[in-house]
Structures are given as C-alpha cells and as structure tokens.
Image: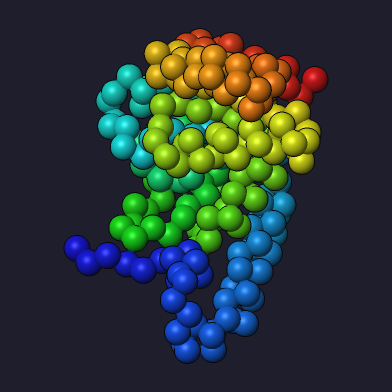
Amino acid sequence: MSRRVTADERLLSSVLDEQWKRDAAWRVLKIQSEFVEGFETLESRKIGQAIGVYGSARTPEGSREYGQGVTLGRKLVEAGYGVVTGGGPGTMEAANRGAFDAGGCSVGLGIELPFEQGTNPYVNVELNFHYFFARKVMFLKYSQGFCALPGGYGTMDELFESLTLVQTEKVGHFPIALIGSAYWGGLVDWLRDTMAADGKIDQKDVDLLLVTDDLDEAVAHMKAGQE
C-alpha cells in the first residue's frame, strides 16, 4: 500500500516549494474551515457534558482492555456524560461502542493519517480533521475530563497536553484518570520520584493524575471534577 502525504505533513514540511507558496493562503482558509465546522457541528448537536477517552488503536476486540473500554463508555453515559474519542479502532472503538449501546452521545473526532483507519461504526456524531491541532482544540473544548486506558504515543501526547494546560491554568479544573495501575504506575512513579524530586514540577502537579483499576472510581473522579 502506498503511503499518503497528509495535510499536516505538507503544512509542516521545511521544503517550501513554489506550489506550497502559491497555496499558502488557501491552506489558512482550510485550517479556518476545520475550526468553523468543528464548532458548528458540536454546538448544533448539543452533545452536553462529555468525557474524552483515549487509548491504543491497536487494542484487539475481545481483549480485557477492549472490554474495559466498552464498560467505561457505558458507565460514563449512565453517569450523564457523552463520550468523545478519536473515532478509530481499538480502545476508541470500545469506548464509543459502550456509549452507543447505552443510548448516549458517542463522538468520533477522526484524523487523516498516512494509512487510513476509518471511523468506527459506533459513532453518532462524526467529524474528520486534516490537522491535529484543530482536532485537539475540539477535544479540549468539548470534554470536561479525560480517561486514559493503556495507549501509545498518541495517548501520551493528549495526556501531557492536558496536564500542561491544567498546570499552566490555561484551562480550569480538568480531571484526569489513568486506568490501569500496572501500565501507568511506572510513569507516575517517575514523575514523582524523578521529575518532581528534581524540582522540574511540583508534587501537586503529579497529584493532577488519578491512577486506578476501578472504572467506578474513574467515573466518580470525573463527576467530582465538575463539583
């Protein structure tokens, strides 16, 4: 399968050929249109309070983590939330599936990738983006909290972006739960014992993270963050 060149890659390339220069103004309008479409779609659908759920696209259906994602999506809907994911397979599909099957709002914010993944079938509000930064704004504006199941670089990216915005007070209180102590515990130990111990962050910055194996505790943490 041939590799696609994405809009993000074209935008960020250091090779500014003449075609890029000619298209630069139109590219800005395309970026603007992604923000406008995102805001208009999510406002018009009145998704209400929602929780962003992140995790690996590589999580196989039938695995324990996939089952956790389904259960988490259902429990969030039962607690009065919609679910927002990246709209892809794996853990994202699982959380959307739990929300969808429970009759709740199931949002998928897809992204153009070199090898297309496609939107999972358990989404009832769908948006697709060319630019990661436009998509990230939608996640943060329309989510009131963040639950992370085990994931890779994408999950880490979203996690630390959220943490940075809370730490720097660019956003209000934003509860964050890391689900899976065996998976996340080493990371949080390093944040506390190395990064905070060396004075690079404060201990209270580590305390922004709840690490738990209990899905009910994670949902309760989301609710407590809104009180």
Q: Quadrant of the C terminus?
A: top right
Q: Position of residue 174 (x, y in %)?
A: 70, 29
Say which quarter of the image contains residue 105: top right
- Identify which residue is drawn at 57% across, 76% down: 27
Q: How are the colours assigned in the image? A: rainbow
Q: Position of residue 144 (x, y in %)?
A: 69, 33
- Identify which residue is drawn at 37% across, 53% down: 118
- Identify which residue is drawn at 36% across, 26% down: 66
Say which quarter of the image contains residue 33: bottom right
**Residue lying furthest front:** 198
- Identify which residue is drawn at 60% across, 21% down: 198
Residue 54 showing in the rendered view:
yes
In front: 193, or 55? 193
Q: Position of residue 45 (x, y in %)?
A: 67, 50
Residue 47 showing in the rendered view:
no
Left or right: where does residue 184 sit relative to residue 224? left
In front: 190, or 89? 190
Q: Quadrant of the N terminus?
A: bottom left
Q: Position of residue 127 (x, y in %)?
A: 54, 55
Question: Against 225, is 82 above or below?
Answer: below
Question: Against 169, is 218 above or below?
Answer: above
Q: How many marks?
A: 0
